[in-house]
Amino acid sequence: MEFLQTLNDIGFWDMLTFAVATIGVMSLLLVRKKRISQFSVHFTYFFGTDYANYPNVVCLEVRNLMDSPVVISRPNFRFRGGLMPGNNAHGNSATGDYEIKFREVDTKGEIQRGFSYASMMLRHRGIAFSFIPIDDGLTEEQFLAMLNHGRWWHKLGFGKGLGDLYLNVAILREDKIDVVRMKVPLLTTHRHNTSPYLGGGALPS
C-alpha cells in the first residue's frame, strides 16, 4: 500500500494515463493515414508465371468504390521480413523503394494490354492492376512460411508483414480535393487464379 501511495504522490498514475491516451491517439492517426473508406488494395501472388523475367510475383489490385473519382500516384514498394525482390525488379538502391506501374482492369475483369502508368485515374468501380517481382528462386512453400510467421501478431495489429505499399490517393470531390498518403502492409494474400498478364502487347505464345 505504501508503494502505491508513493506512486500516487509522484503523479505516476497521471503520467501513465497520459501515455496510454497519447499512444491511443497516435494509433488512430496512423490507421486513418493508411485507410480510405470504399477504397481498397488487394494482394494476391503467383509462382511460375508465363514470363521468364518475372517468374514469381505478388500482384495487387486497387479498387475505387467511391462516387468520386480518384487519382493514384507515386506508388512504390519496400521489402522486409526476409522477402527479397526479383532479379528484374526495378528499384532504387539508395532508398530501397521498388517501382510499381498500373494497368487498368476492364469491366470483364481483364487486364488491359499496352502501356502501364505510375499515375492513373479511377472512376466509380474502377480497378487498377500491378505486380511486384519477388525472389526468382523462392518456392511457394517458403513464401507462405514467411507470410505466416507471426500471423497472430498481424491479427493483433502488431505485425509488420513482408513489405509495404506506398501510394498517394487524390480524392476528386466536387467541393475539394483530398490527398491521402497510404501505407498498406503485405500481411496476408492468396494465390492468383491464373498466370497474370504482366506486360507487352499480347500474351506470350
Image: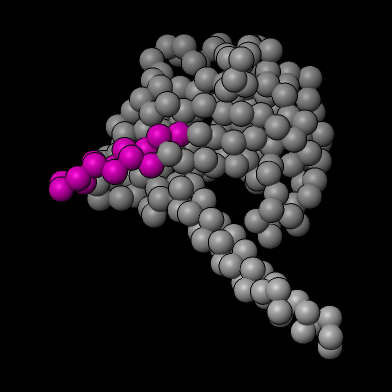
Where in the figure is residue 99, as x and y percent of width and height?
Answer: 52, 20
Q: Is residue 197 left or right of residue 47?
A: left
Residue 173 forms part of the magenta stretch = yes
- Location of the C terminus (image quadrant): top right
Where is residue 138? Give x, y as percent.
Answer: 78, 25
Q: Residue at x 64, y 35 (%)?
A: 163
Quadrant in which residue 204 is drawn: top right
- The residue drawn where x is 78% and y is 50% is 150
User: Which residue is at a point 45% across and 22% down the rendered structure image?
Assistant: 101
* For residue 190, above or below residue 138: below
Specify start and end residues of the magenta stretch as a single range: 167-180
Q: Is residue 84 magenta?
A: no
In the image shown, does 183 or 86 lie closer to the viewer? 183
Q: In which quadrant is the N terminus drawn?
A: bottom right
Instruction: Look at the picture and state if 147 lies above or below 205.
Output: below
Farthest-out residue, right = 2
Above or below, 84 relative to 11: above
Q: What secondary structure characterizes most of the magenta part?
A: strand
- Of residues 12 and 68, the one drawn nearer to the viewer in this rendering: 12
Residue 176: % across, % down: 19, 45
Q: Residue at image x 61%, y 15%?
A: 94
Residue 95 as seen in the image, left or right of residue 139: left
Q: Percent x, y for residue 183? A: 52, 40
Determine if residue 55 is in view: no
Whether residue 203 is visible to the viewer of this picture, yes or no, is: yes
